[in-house]
Image (tube, helix red, strand yellow):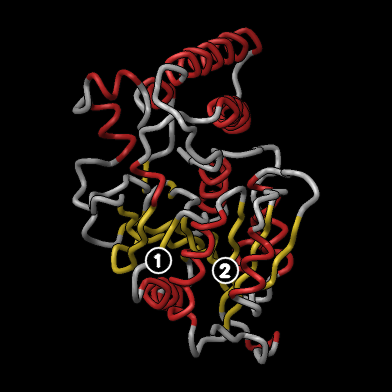
Amino acid sequence: MLDLSDFAPSRMELSVVIVNYRSRERLLECIAALAPELAGREAEILVVDNDSRDGAPEAVTARFPAVRVRVNADNLGYARAVNQGIADGRGAHVLVMNPDCIVRPGAVRALLDYMREHPRTGIAAPRILNLDGSIEYSARAFPDGFAFLFNRYSVLTRLFPRNPWTRGYLLTDWDHASARDVDWVTGACMMVRRTAIDRVGGMDEAFFMFNEDVDWCRRMGQAGFGVTYVPAAEAVHWIGASKQRVARRVIYERHRGMIHYFRKHHPANPALDAFASVLIMARAWLMIAMNALRRSPEAPPEERP
């Protein structure tokens, strides 16, 4: 059993923050995989439950009594819940994870080692794999106007997978075998230096879900901190293999996040801003319509881009 109760706040090395929303079984598997990774370390696990009502908090407490659980009365969104976990934690480093990510042996050590050896790195992220062992392109270039048309889920990417805009955005021409500074990494699994958080701030809570990780990485870079992909650490992401129907709110929030991101980092004149927003939301409704044709049941609502 994982026992972290004797760790003194002044000696805490790592806080793991996991935001849960209706992912009870995945959450338990995530924590079980973390337990041997944290054994003997000055570490803690904090679960923030966004009003799941699925018995997850009770199940975590029963199976892992040392894990600290915060239960929100409402679904506050991913960014706000992450910030709650960061505020509650005491670690010099914070490992932010989705409950559907499973770290592989040695991943936590590899990320901590990299952070210690590279003090200007603000965020370090593992190589993330799909269930079939293929690479999930979780390290990417900053999105531009073409990324809206040629991102990982777009119809154009599916029709023309080797187009230069998708390859440039997803960095698919890189073999992902060596550590590399990148523009941004997905928030499904990322280790963040607390001193960097103190300087840059937490996630932007104007993002309910999606694109908060892009924004956070961008702000880290603007403050002079590196964002680094570390393939010596690996994690498996369950959601990467999902082909089922996605909740409508997931699609809507993804696109709403796009609008907020571009308004924040690429301000334009009001006419162009309005035109771009209309296009983005039109794409959202098209994806909602196409999604309705997929097989059910719906995929978990925490699926991330």
Q: Residue at x 57, y 56 (%)?
A: 24
Q: Is residue 266 visible?
A: no
Mark 2 or mark 1: whose residue is earlier in sequence: 2
Residue at image point 43% right, 50% down: 185
Residue drawn at point x = 69 percent, y = 56 percent: 83
- Helix, strand or loop for disc 1: strand
- Secondary structure type for disc 2: strand
Quadrant location of the N terminus in the rendered image: bottom right
State left or right for residue 271 relative to residue 102.
Answer: right
Mark 2 and mark 1: Cα distance apart in space: 12 Å
Q: Which residue is drawn at 49% across and 33% down?
A: 298
Q: What residue type is labelled 1?
A: Val
Instruction: Give the image location of residue 256, x and y in percent.
Output: 61, 26
Determine whether 227 is above or below 74 in the image: below
Pointer 2 residue: 16
Q: In this view, does 298 lie to the left or right of 171?
A: right
Q: Quadrant of residue 268?
A: top right
Mark 1 and mark 2 in contact (Cβ < 8 Å)?
Answer: no
Which image quadrant for residue 231?
Answer: bottom left
The disc placed on residue 103 is: 1
Q: Which of 192 and 6 is in front in this view?
A: 6
Kind of residue sitting beneath label 2:
Val
Which quarter of the image is occupied by the C terminus?
top left
Query: Where residue 230 sits in the image (x, y, percent)?
Result: 34, 63
